Image (spheres, helix red, strand yellow):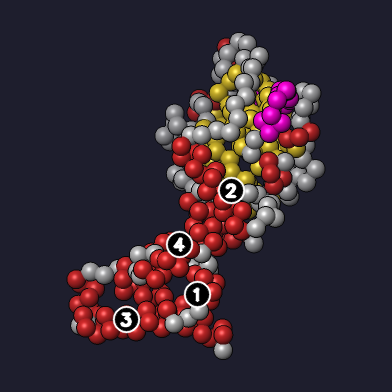
């Protein structure tokens, strides 16, 4: 009976939203008279408010968060219920801050988690910081950098040009006495993506020139000198899956969970020019988007990999702007 009652309440809520949020003269005319409609809404609201507050909070926690925000505007009683519920406020703040869980892996009470989340968001809003550290950069930086979960990564540029020849990273969570760690792939680096907290993973896209010799394909490391010699023909992009915490002392360490730690991505004509890359990692899935802004005839390319097995789960060659989100990951489960 409880399941039937909850299902009935959810159906009433859905209809209530439909009536309140999509009202227009044309829509009201198709529904019927104002009196009958408002009478139904009053009855629905009365039935809804007759439920115990604990039950309503449990039901509202399963609603889409956009619907929960709409519900705030339908009734003073419901607004007061949602505004005073720690669970519903926590869910709303999670959505607005783009977190799935905060603090990550926390076992603290929901009240403490909500306070930590709201305090962190206020510091971002007011641009308040709890500590200040000075980090000396003693190498020539390139245009590649990232800051995720307290890990700061900065590319190491070539002394002769714009190529990124290595990566330096530092764990800012250590506070004082910060030390730069370094590793390279013995080939130029194009871009990178991180998933530190979940997998200790850094995904690095590297590049080399491709030479065709006696029916064999040979990759040649691009250097500033070789680039000045002229067009090498084709470039090869590879995806390297590394364990960040073990990649130091100039050694790049393959991630132990990656069955294929180096995955060939594509070859492209050198005249296509510079490529822009975006990498997002969610759970076992890695999305890689490659765009050639200088060549309008070259389509955007999107791959979704299972990075642990190296299998391609999705590929697209067209103009696309996509993010890896839970609805997309559900396609591959």
Is residue 236 shown in magenta? no
Work out whether residue 238 can be spotted: no
Expressed as whole percent of the image width and height from the top left, the position of residue 253 reads: 78, 33
Res. 53 mark:
1
Q: Residue at x 45, y 32 (%)?
A: 293
Expressed as whole percent of the image width and height from the top left, the position of residue 277 reads: 55, 35
> Which residue is more in the foreground, 172 or 246?
172
Distance between mark 2 and mark 4 Cα atoms: 17 Å
Res. 275 mark:
none
**In the picture, residue 134 is in which quadrant?**
top right
- 1 vs 3, front mark: 1
Res. 83 mark:
4
Q: Residue at x 22, y 75 (%)?
A: 28
- 2 vs 3, front mark: 2
Distance between mark 1 and mark 2 Cα atoms: 25 Å
Expressed as whole percent of the image width and height from the top left, the position of residue 214 reads: 72, 26
Q: Which residue is mark 3?
A: 42
Work out whether residue 3 can be spotted: yes
Res. 116 mark:
2
**Disc 2 on helix, strand or loop?**
helix
| Highlighted range, magenta | 172-189
Distance between mark 4 and mark 1 Cα atoms: 12 Å
> Label 1 crowding class (10 Å Cα cut-off): few <14, some 14-19, many 20+?
some
**Above-or-below relation of 57 to 269:** below
Distance between mark 1 and mark 3 Cα atoms: 18 Å
């Amino acid at each position: 009976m409880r399941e039937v009652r909850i299902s009935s309440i959810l159906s009433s809520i859905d209809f209530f939203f439909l009536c309140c949020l999509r009202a227009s003269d044309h829509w009201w005319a198709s529904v019927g008279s104002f009196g009958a409609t408002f009478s139904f809404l009053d009855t629905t609201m009365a039935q809804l408010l007759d439920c115990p507050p604990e039950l309503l909070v449990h039901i509202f926690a399963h609603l889409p968060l956009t619907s929960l925000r709409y519900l705030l505007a339908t009734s003073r009683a419901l607004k007061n219920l949602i505004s005073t519920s720690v669970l519903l406020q926590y869910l709303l703040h999670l959505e607005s801050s783009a977190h799935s869980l905060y603090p990550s892996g926390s076992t603290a009470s929901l009240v403490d988690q909500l306070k930590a989340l709201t305090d962190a968001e206020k510091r971002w809003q007011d641009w308040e910081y709890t500590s200040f550290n000075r980090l000396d950069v003693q190498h020539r930086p390139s245009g590649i950098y990232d800051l995720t979960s307290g890990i700061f990564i900065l590319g190491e540029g070539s002394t002769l040009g714009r190529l990124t020849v290595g990566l330096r990273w530092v764990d800012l969570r250590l506070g004082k006495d910060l030390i730069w760690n370094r590793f390279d792939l013995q080939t130029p680096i194009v871009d990178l993506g991180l998933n530190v907290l979940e997998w200790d993973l850094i995904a690095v896209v590297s590049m080399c020139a491709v030479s065709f010799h006696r029916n064999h394909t040979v990759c040649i490391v691009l250097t500033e000198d070789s680039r000045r010699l002229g067009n090498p023909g084709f470039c090869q992009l590879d995806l390297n899956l590394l364990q960040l915490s073990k990649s130091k002392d100039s050694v790049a360490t393959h991630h132990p969970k990656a069955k294929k730690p180096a995955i060939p991505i594509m070859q492209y004509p050198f005249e296509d020019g510079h490529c822009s890359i975006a990498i997002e990692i969610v759970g076992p899935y890695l999305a890689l988007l490659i765009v050639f802004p200088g060549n309008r005839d070259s389509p955007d390319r999107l791959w979704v990999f299972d990075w642990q097995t190296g299998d391609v789960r999705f590929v697209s060659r067209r103009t696309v702007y996509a993010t890896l989100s839970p609805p997309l990951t559900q396609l591959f489960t």
